[in-house]
Image (cartoon, rainbow, N blue to C red):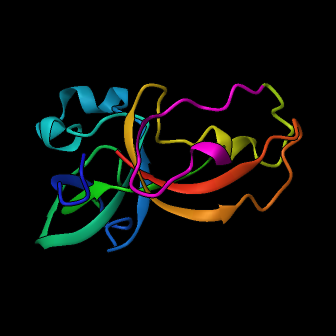
């Protein structure tokens, strides 16, 4: 998905705020019989999205969201990730590979394995944000980058 690509989906009315980000986790069993299922479930599971706009005032009934759902315009959010500083160049196109590290207690682990990206995703380094704010437990030299699929 590029920066300009947008989609329309449905989201709970309490969550339908411009700028709000969420990770789509997929359908629940209650969604199986819902007539709006195809509109709600048109996103890719385990991806991070940002709401760009709320469409109209119409609220639809939903078995999950107590106040119903509204149509929103969304796009995939850029992801902040840590990567080897020798490979971090703004504008570069890469194939995402999470850091090969099993130190889950490391303060950088979640940034080295960001939610919303999967191994093999083709990304562009939109921005190199600088040095990592914490030391890597393996001693690697890391930079924080903003990635866009």
Whether residue 69 can be seen here: no
Q: Where is residue 139 drawn, in percent x and y?
A: 88, 41
Quick check: is 86 in the magenta stretch? yes
Q: Residue at x 21, y 72 (%)?
A: 53
- Residue 97 vertical placement versus 24 (above, below): above
Question: Position of 38 compared to 106: left or right?
Answer: left
- What's the magenta bit mostly, secondary-structure-wise? loop
User: For this view, does 33 lie left or right of residue 25?
Assistant: left
Locate residue 104: give its quadrant. Answer: top right
Relative image position of residue 115 (x, y in whole percent):
54, 41
Q: Which residues are magenta?
A: 84-101
Quarter of the view holding residue 5: bottom left
Q: Residue at x 50, y 53 (%)?
A: 89
Horizontal and vertical percent position of residue 45 = 37, 34
21 on left or right of 107: left
Figure quadrant of residue 98 = top right
């Amino acid at each position: 998905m590029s920066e300009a690509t947008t989609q329309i989906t449905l989201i709970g009315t309490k969550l339908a705020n411009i700028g709000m980000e969420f990770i789509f986790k997929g359908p629940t069993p209650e969604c199986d019989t819902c007539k709006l299922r195809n509109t709600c479930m048109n996103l890719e599971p385990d991806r991070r999205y940002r709401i760009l706009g709320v469409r109209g005032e119409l609220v639809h009934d939903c078995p999950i969201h107590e106040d119903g759902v509204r149509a929103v315009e969304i796009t995939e959010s850029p992801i902040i990730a840590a990567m080897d500083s020798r490979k971090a160049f703004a504008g570069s196109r890469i194939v995402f590979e999470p850091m090969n590290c099993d130190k889950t207690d490391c303060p950088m682990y979640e940034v080295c394995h960001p939610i919303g990206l999967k191994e093999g995703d083709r990304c562009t380094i939109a921005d190199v944000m600088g040095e990592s704010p914490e030391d890597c437990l393996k001693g690697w030299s890391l930079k924080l980058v903003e990635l866009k699929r």
